Image: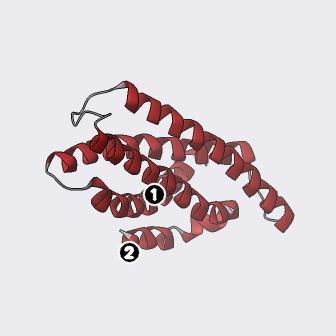
Amino acid sequence: MGLISGTLLSSNEEILYSIPIMLLIIPALNSLTGDISTVLVSRLTTHLYIGTLSPKIKISERLKEDFYGLLITLLLSLVSLLFLGYLVGVISGIKIINPLLMSFIITLTILLLFFIMFITLFIGAIFLFKRGMDPNNFLIPFVTSLADFLTPLFLILFIIIFI
């Protein structure tokens, strides 16, 4: 996955160089997505082992609580990231083209990734748990690679669509 992600980034250098603030923010977005997803896997696994989450693919109150809690954490982290990214961009003299559009693209990317990761990891955790495997051992490395691939993919895709 890392090789594919690197190839994707290098083949779209022109797009990324045209919007230098994205080069500044991509590592932080990868980290944010990976960190939130890792917390999700850990919470899902813990709930499955202690029995507060049924090993069935269905919506429960516990799942809703985790979803909303992580979504609020993600949004607060995203606001902080956007503020710091903008501040560093201004201080370092990086030209920020249409900050509202850039914020929209970044927010759309992160929210889409969160929903994809939440559904994928929930189903994956249930599937692995039912087969007697520890979801942490499989899903945490998987989610890190997936986040490293999907974050630049969606960013580049949305930049192409909206700019």
Classify residue 51 as left or right of residue 102. left
Q: What element carries label 1?
A: helix
| Amino acid on which the number 1 mark rests in the picture | Leu
Which residue was labeled with disc 2?
Answer: 3
Residue 88 vertical position relative to residue 158 in the rendered view, above or below: below
Count of numbered tags: 2
Percent x, y for residue 62? 39, 30
Describe the element under mark 2 as helix, strand or loop.
Answer: helix
The colour scheme applied to this rendered structure is secondary structure
Look at 15% across and 52% down and name the residue there.
132
For the point 75% across and 50% down, the residue is 83
Q: In which quarter of the image is residue 52?
A: top left
Number of residues whose C-alpha sits closer than 10 Å to that of mark 2, classed few (under 14), some (14–19) or many (20 or more): few
> Label 2 is placed on what type of residue?
Leu
Which one is in front, 37 or 136? 136
- The residue most toward the front is 50
Observer-nearest residue: 149 or 124?
Answer: 124
Name the residue located 28 percent from the left edge and 54 percent from the top edge.
135
Q: Please report the residue visible at 49 percent of the width from the left and 69 percent of the height from the top.
A: 9
Q: How far apart are marks 1 and 2 (CA)?
A: 13 Å
Relative side of 75 to 149, left or right = right
Does 6 sit above or below residue 75?
below
Image location of residue 7, percent across then percent down: 42, 73
* Mark number, residue 153: 1
- Residue 22 lies left or right of residue 40; in this view the side is right
10 relative to 28 in the view: left or right: left
Residue 91, image x, y percentages: 86, 63
